[in-house]
Image: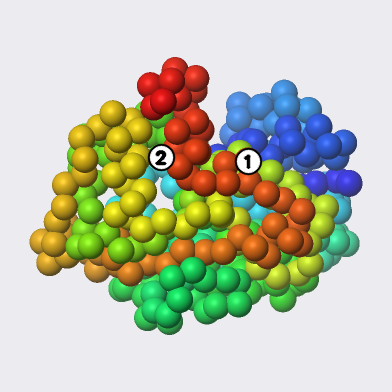
């Protein structure tokens, strides 16, 4: 099949291109720069320069490719994430999840594309009440903190647009691994190493993780199978902050994280940050495993954090 990947040189796209090429697919991948588009060529695909915010360019690139499948992996998070000003951190990504998603779907329909796959997220976006582990049938949070409302609306839009077009929305858990914020040398991992990430309140917020390579493998599986709908792409072990954060600190040789009451943390990380740490819900991967024929290599973040955060030297230090 001919696969068009919008955002082929990002965290996930750069891993997806060689997987699909090795599986025998003809891959066209986009990047905003000629230099980075050349890495798609080097991986065996065909690199195309495209700015995802230029809707005319999006339309033109899809029609020229005439793909069987469109994969939307466009994000813009180079500036880092500020929990207290979360929507500001995701402003461009939210545009890519709304206007650009609509442009990709319209162009795909015009080109006769049979399937579209989009990137979504699961975790804090789940409803923060009821069962601790959510499935794709459970609703998104109807009462989000003010700091994340625009971002949640963007997530809802990209999912709804894809599914209504007969496509697939992949709800990824928190990425970790080489090149990620939660990876060797990454911003979040270094903050944990420096004891700048505390356990807030009881640390009862539940997080679902996925290694970046496992996320790419799930996406490759969705290219070939699965029905229209939403799929949680997470590992087998959702875990509360009070469990995973101290264990990660131990694995990287850091001191145990500090503890802060919610009232003291709120001025620093906002209502959204407190909710992430205290009331967020995890996600089940049962549907993805059953329908996509996919299972994560790192079934638990415990093993993934120990062996999959970075290169061999970092893994040996963690062991």
Element class at badge 2? loop
Near mark 2 (Cα within 10 A), the count class, few <14, some 14-19 or many ≥20, is many
Which tag, 1 or 2, sits closer to the chain's start? 2
Mark 1 to mark 2: distance in Å?
18 Å
Q: Nearer the viewer, mark 1 or mark 2?
A: 1
Q: Image quadrant for the C terminus? A: top left
Residue sitting at x 14%, y 56%: 260
Q: Residue at x 36, y 48 (%)?
A: 244
**Contact (Cβ within 8 Å) of mark 1 with mark 2:** no
Left or right of residue 46, residue 301 in this image = left
Residue 217 visible from this viewpoint: yes
Give the residue at mark 2. 182
Q: Position of residue 123 (x, y in %)?
A: 46, 62
The image position of residue 111, as x and y in percent, is 85, 59
Q: Label 1 belongs to which residue?
A: 297
Q: Secondary structure at mark 1?
A: loop
Q: How is the image coloured?
A: rainbow
Where residue 183 sits: x, y (%)?
43, 34
Residue 101 seen: no
């Amino acid at each position: 099949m001919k696969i068009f990947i919008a955002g082929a040189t990002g965290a996930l796209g750069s891993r997806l291109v060689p997987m699909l090429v090795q599986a025998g697919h003809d891959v066209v991948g986009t990047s905003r720069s000629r230099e980075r588009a050349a890495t798609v060529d080097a991986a065996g695909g065909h690199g195309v320069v495209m700015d995802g915010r230029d809707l005319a360019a999006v339309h033109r690139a899809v029609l020229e490719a005439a793909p069987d499948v469109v994969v939307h992996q466009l994000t813009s998070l180079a500036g880092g994430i500020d929990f207290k000003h979360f929507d500001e951190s995701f402003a461009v990504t939210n545009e890519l999840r709304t206007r650009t998603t609509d442009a990709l779907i319209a162009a795909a329909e015009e080109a006769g594309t049979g399937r579209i796959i989009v990137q979504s997220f699961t975790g804090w976006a789940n409803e923060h009440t009821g069962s601790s582990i959510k499935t794709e049938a459970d609703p998104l949070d109807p009462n989000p903190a003010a700091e994340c409302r625009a971002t949640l609306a963007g997530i809802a839009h990209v999912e709804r647009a894809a599914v209504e077009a007969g496509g697939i929305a992949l709800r990824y858990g928190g990425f970790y691994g080489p090149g990620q914020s939660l990876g060797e040398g990454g911003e979040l991992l270094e903050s944990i190493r420096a004891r700048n990430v505390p356990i807030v309140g009881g640390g009862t917020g539940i997080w679902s993780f996925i290694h970046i390579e496992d996320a790419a493998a799930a996406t490759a599986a969705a290219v070939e199978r699965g029905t229209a709908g939403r799929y949680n792409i997470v590992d087998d072990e959702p875990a509360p902050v009070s469990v995973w954060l101290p264990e990660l600190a131990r694995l990287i040789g850091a001191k145990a994280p500090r503890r802060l009451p919610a009232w003291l943390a709120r001025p620093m990380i906002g209502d959204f940050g407190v909710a992430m740490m205290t009331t967020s819900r995890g996600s089940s991967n049962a549907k993805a495993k059953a329908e996509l024929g996919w299972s994560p290599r790192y079934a638990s973040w415990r093993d993934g954090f120990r062996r999959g955060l970075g290169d061999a030297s970092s893994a040996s230090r963690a062991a």
